[in-house]
Image (tube, helix red, strand yellow):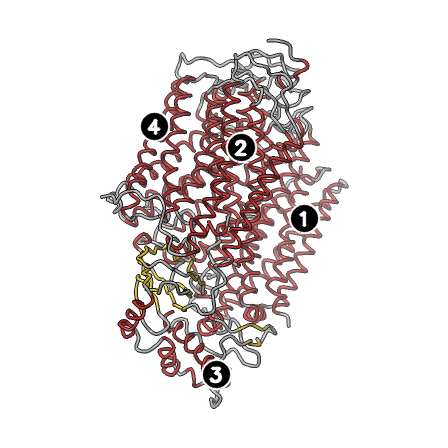
Amino acid sequence: MSAGIELWPPAASHHAQQVDLLIGSFGAMVWLLTIPVFVLMSWFAIRYRRSREVNRDHAPTRNLWVEVGWSVIPFILVLGFYVWATMLFLDLYRPPPDAIPIHVVAKQWMWKFQHPDGAREINNLHVPAGRPVKLIMTSEDVIHSFYVPALRQKQDLVPGRYTSLWFNADKPGRYPLRCAEFCGADHSAMGGTLIVMPPQDYAVWLGRNRDGGMDGTLAQAGARLFRDLGCSGCHSAAASVKAPPLEGIFGRPVALADGGTLIADDQYLSDSILLPNKQVAAGYRPIMPTYGNVLAPEQVNALVAYLKSSRAREDSK
Amino acid sequence: MTDEPRFEHPPEERAPSYLAESHSLRSWFFTTDHKRIALLYLVSITLFFLIGAGAAALIRLDLLTPQGDLLTNDGYNRAFSIHGIIMVWFFLIPSIPNVLGNFLVPIMIGTRDLAFPRLNLLSWYIYILSGLLTLYVVVSGGVDTGWTFYTPLSSVYANGAVVATIVAVFISGFSTILTGLNFIVTIHKLRAPGMTWSRLPLFIWSHYAVSIIFVLATPVLAITLLLVAAERLIGIGVFDPRLGGDPLLFQHLFWFYSHPAVYIMVLPALGVVSELITAAAHKRIFGYWFVAFASIAIAVIGFMVWGHHMFVSGQSVFASAVFSFLSIAVAVPSAIKVYNWTATLYKADVAIDAPLLFALGFIGLFVAGGLTGLMLAMLAIDVHVTDTYFVVAHFHYIMVGGSVTAFFGGLHFWWPKMTGRLYNETLGRIAAILILVGFNITFFPQFLLGYQGMPRRYHVYPPEFQVLHVISSLGAALLAVGYAMPAFYLLWSLLPGGRRAPANPWGASGLEWTTSSPPPKHNFIAQPVVVRQPYDYPLAHPASRDDG
Amino acid sequence: MAEGGVQEPFARAARQREAERLGMLIFLASEVMLFGGIFAAALALRLEHPAGYVDAAHHLKLWLGTANTGVLLTSSLCAALAVQAARNGQARWAACALWGAVALGTVFLAIKGVEYAGEYREGLMPGMATTHFEGRTQQLFMNLYFIGTGLHAVHVTFGLALLAAAALNRGARQDRHAMLIGNVALYWHLVDVIWVFLYPTLYLAGVR
């Protein structure tokens, strides 16, 4: 049966409270602008109803300044809210550098999460309270959307590309997580729980679950894959086939065959594995086979994590 | 109710009406008379409305319980998909333009027919062909993509009759394009002598604006759907990431059509309401040029806001900020219309009849829908409420609360002109109020559901949302009664012995009220010549108005 | 439609001609938007795979595409000449020019057919048993190429039928206002213009 009626969803982050404040203030302004219209409209209709003797002389049919006034003033008021809402939105695209990266892969109809140190889970996502978390997300099949109402945030997961979302949940608790983009038959069953834990509890949970998924950290799993797939056969200085060296490539500029340059990021590394001919590094021939049919998205994530970690090793030298 | 004659050639009510001309089936199915074609459309869109409403009833019944006892997950998906597809392409888009527009555009500008009468009939046949294909889809088990056909769900993963549905929508597009073409040419080339652009009724302005969208946006939908069908049949891969294609490209192309399509549904409604308000107020519209150009502005800016459907899809942040700004800008012309309608009622001579009640109901619901649309245009708010029931409620306020209410208002207002009969005014007022109340009970709770985080297109939902869903379903039952009532009293008025309508039962201005009810085959006995401004009611000339 | 004198609901022939011309132009605007979708897709594809797009375009037969551009432009010229001849009252010249346009349009389709056949032999036609692509971007490009040129070829075929109908219609040839011929020629010019945009989008992209 019904669990009662709840008029306002819980807010698990500072951002969520900001969104509530924004919609509350905007709602107040909206009422301020509309109530006079509704009141005047009803009052005019009743006061000037047919057969009633009232003064109808000098009924105006145009007035330029009135028109300009009621177009421009509300527009400027709304523009103020536009600036506010856009600033809040831009914050969502500036994750702090120390955010914990968690990989998310969605498929019909489940959520798969990979923590940086190897713990894996399905449909439930454990995060520490008060620490920024960055989700690096992709989909195996159709478009899904990661939605946690308590965070007031959602982001689509698009096959073939990475999208990301970061948050800092400061209130421990269990919050529903839902798929918001229609994704087929069991769309409505594609839910889970975001579990925000005090940091010490999270550490304990991680310790218990580290071996729950792949053994070792994500980067270690990636290193093993790198070896098993024979990537080093080409991508190493000693190899007979000439391919770009990959040590420490993450975050560095890469010159491309078509003359452009880009910074090697998650998207570039993943594309280079799945669609190797999309952006070919300058000075190399486009001969790498695609691994699109060989690797699952989680394995690509592991490889990318490994390449990232090789940057960290280089930097620490 | 009698005003001085407004036009130089008052009609002599002697010629047989367009209804009495001939009674054979042939004279209906091969007619090129725009008025008869309008009635053919009225009957056919009503049938599709019933099918779409049936699907809506299934959805609302199923959502009475959180676990969805009536339908399977897949069955539910098929129900809302067919509801959306039929209501958008087979009811809302053709509703006002093809019924009221078809009937009134030539009469309002004082000509005998649309510029290309045979093309007009052809567009009805194309509509029927696509409609039959849609019925085939319904019978053969339906489609499970939603009306939005997002790739790669539609192109690879869905297992319903996707290609047949796409072909049906594709074909219906030609009907729409031909209608738009016909309206534009008619309005440019067939206006009566003296019917200058500054004398055009606002109904015509809004139909001109909507025709531009018909002609320029519909082909983009056509090619997009063609690409989806080709993707599904031979895997061309333009939208398939496994071949390096881009699923977001589909969304860009789809919304490039479908956002203007929202204005296709609402612009004609705005035109209808301008007519209803002025006729009830017996006063010239306040700010004629602002209201007229607002329609054009909506049509033009409406082409530049499609990206506001994609704020969380992964499009660039900069693009989102620009689309958000433009979406706020497109609200301005809509607001201008509302303010001008309100000002029109000031010092007016208001007849509180059913058409006015529908018009006022429209304004209230349209304002609520428009302002929640403004909320959705705000980036940070949209991230939370997009793809939830907040969006469902928002667009139902615009399309059902707005367009359908205006369509009913227009149908009541012009019913005497179209059929020559008067409907029961008391029942009309009751229906108008019932629809307003039922609509709000149905859809207002959905705003709350959305803000609480209930995603749209959910068959099974958390139990804490049940109370609001039950309220919504009860409201839907009330709304259904409200919509069913006019069907009965309007048809009742057609029975032998129904009250006959005079040429101008509302004492309204406008050329359509100068000819008989129903009009003769060629609309006017003699070519009308226009010598006055539009909405030339006595109140517009306070100086010349004497007491009484 | 035009030749039978004034029809309902028009009162004057001049007004009816203006309306028919305006209707044709609006229809063409609609057609432009239809192909706009194809060009948008090609633009997106090229932005996302700059190198692969150029490589794939390199495989097209540039000289066949170029020849076809010349053929179609000349055909369009014939259509324009037909309009001028009809306006000058030279009905026979108008018919000759129209048939010239039809002949060149047919040559265009023939060359296109030869090109398709070559691509079929090379295994570049999607959905066939012999299909083998060098890479995914090439597959994507060729698919778009077939959709774009195929849709264009459908328009060419339809245009040829219209041109032939106009050439066979005595009333149209003798119409000093060249209404039917003028509208058909407009349509034919649009088909030409679309090709003029398809040619650089698909063929010239591969020129290094």
Quarter assignment of residue B158:
bottom left
Is B343 rendered above or below residue B54? above
Element assignment for label 1: helix
Element assignment for label 2: helix
Is A295 rendered above or below residue B442? below
Mark 1 = which residue? C98
Residue appearing at x 51%, y 23% in the figure:
A43
Using the numbered discs, state the Cα–Cα distance from disc 2 to disc 1 in whole angstroms.
47 Å
Mark 2 = which residue? B270
Mark 3 = which residue? A314
Quarter assignment of residue A101:
bottom left
Say what amino acid the circle numbered 2 marks: Leu
Q: Are marks 3 and 2 in contact (CB under 8 Å)?
A: no
Say what amino acid the circle numbered 1 marks: Leu
Q: Nearer the viewer, residue A138 or A242?
A: A138
| Circles 3 and 2 on the same chain | no
| Circles 4 and 2 on the same chain | yes
Label 3: few (<14), some (14–19) or many (≥20) C-alpha neighbours in 10 Å: few
Percent coordinates x, y for residue B35 in the rendering: 52, 26
Quarter of the figure with the C terminus of chain C: bottom right
Using the numbered discs, state the Cα–Cα distance from disc 4 to disc 3 in whole angstroms.
73 Å
Mark 4 = which residue? B481
Using the numbered discs, state the Cα–Cα distance from disc 3 to disc 2 in whole angstroms.
65 Å
Residue appearing at x 50%, y 59% in the figure:
A91
Percent coordinates x, y for residue A131 in the rendering: 40, 65
Q: Chain of mark 1?
A: C
